Amino acid sequence: MDFVIKGNLCYCESPARLITVPDGYLVSLDGRVDGAYARLPDQYAKLPLVDVGEHLVLPGLNDLHVHAPQFAYRGLGMDLELIEWLNTRAFPEESQYSDLKYAQRAYDLFVDAMRRSATTRLACFATLHVPATLLLMEKLEAAGLRGFVGKVSMDRNSPDILCERSAQAAAQDVETWLVESRRRFTHIQPILTPRFIPSCTDALMASLGDLMRRYEVPLHSHLSENRTEIRWVEQLRPDAASYADAYDRHGMLTPRTIMAHVVYPEVDEIDLLRERGVMVAHCPASNMNIRSGIAPVRRLLKAGVKVGLGTDVAGGQTIDMMRAVTDAVQVSKLYWRLIDQKQAALTIAEALYLATKGGGAFFGKVGSFERGYETDVIIVDDTALPHPQPMTVAERVERALYLSGECKIVGKYVAGKQVL
Ligand code: GUN
Ligand code: FE
């Protein structure tokens, strides 16, 4: 369906270039943006017009790292650090997804919240259970969202209730799930998801690396999140030169790889991530909550590493990606103040870029209102933030991001299809 949205448009062409078109027209043809205009060119005059009045019209936000089965307990257990938190919160909760009835209820809640959120595309961990993972994919696809879902692989250092029987059985399960999900779904695609190095034997990693190449499938994992975890990886993988190298040895660092966190990268790891074209998912809320630290995002960006944002629910307490944008700005200020004054804080435009066009690159031409980009749009109602003074669209967007809890997402389109 072709259409035009009339409203206050705002998008980022580059990290330094935030573009606004007050009372502008966003033209969508065949699921893609044909242009953002201050005045509607005559050739589009006959298209259906969706007039959203004073509302803000932004590209949809891309959540590059979120755990669907952790949504049900978000906001709990924030007094723990990563490994303890996994053992006492994440693993027991995820083990419940062997029960398809439980998965049905919990994933309904997750998908409904996602549909109503600012997120249009996501890269999402499920659990190791194949039936529940397929159920999640089915629900996300039915909701009109797009992106990647991973059946989690984990065959060591995990409780019996949440551990594969063997590396071989685990790899077989992944292959069955890959084939089945590709047969059944179009817009929600499978992504290989070894949980992190501590939960995957070398044998399982070797099989997953092999599947990655044979099926040309992307990969999603965690890298260098917490100091205790990093020391553990050094002990588990004495063969590897670094945490990143432990993945690279299995051919897992590619332009179709997302690595979440990267809070404590060594210089050679940053080089490796750039050379391989890996996308880093920066998850500031999670890094605060479970006290992992502050990722050196400015250093990554200066080095030419690709960066997007993630909520990492339930390490992060909310799936609100508008909040992730301002969290990224805020933690970057603390990094500058407390850790390294050579690394300038992020601006709001830079952080919005990371959540839109930056992370959107993982999904194709996604995250901008430039011609040819897929029409991913959110309509933001900020009327709960009245102001006596005049305010530019850019100022209203900044406030809506900081005060997202007081704003409403009143419409959403993914690849030109209305989903809200
Ligand atoms: N590392 C391994 N598993 C997890 C997880 O579920 N959440 C986070 N934040 N880090 C992890
Ligand atoms: Fe995570």
Image (cartoon, rainbow, N blue to C red):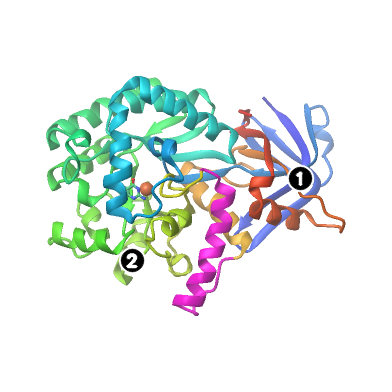
Residue 190 seen in this snapshot: yes
Magenta span: chief secondary structure: helix
Is 64 rendered above or below residue 353?
Answer: above
Residue at disc 1, secondary structure: loop
Name the quarter where the N terminus is drawn: top right
Looking at the rendered structure, the kind of residue marked 1 is Ala
- Ligand 2 within 8 A of label 1's CB? no
- Please give left or right for residue 212 compared with residue 308 in the image: left
Is 265 rendered above or below residue 353?
Answer: below
Residue at disc 2, secondary structure: loop
Bounds of the magenta segment: 319-346
Is residue 328 or residue 358 the one in the foreground? 328
Instruction: Give the residue displayed 20% in from the left and 43% down from the top.
Output: 158
Residue 381 x, y percent position in the rendering: 73, 41
Is 9 rendered above or below residue 275?
Answer: above
Name the quarter where the C terminus is drawn: top right
Q: Quadrant of residue 175?
A: top left
Instruction: Give the residue displayed 33% in from the left and 71% down from the top.
Output: 267
Closer to the chain start, of discs 1 and 2, is 2
- Ligand 1 within 8 A of label 2's CB? no
Instruction: Give the residue displayed 31% in from the left and 30% down from the top.
Output: 96
Looking at the rendered structure, the kind of residue marked 2 is Pro
Q: Which residue is mark 2?
A: 265
Q: Which residue is mark 1?
A: 384
Q: Quadrant of residue 58?
A: top right
Residue 60 x, y percent position in the rendering: 60, 42
Instruction: Give the residue displayed 38% in from the left and 56% down from the top.
Output: 290
Local crowd at mark 1 within 10 Å, few (<14), some, or many (≥20)? few
Farthest-out residue, bottom: 341
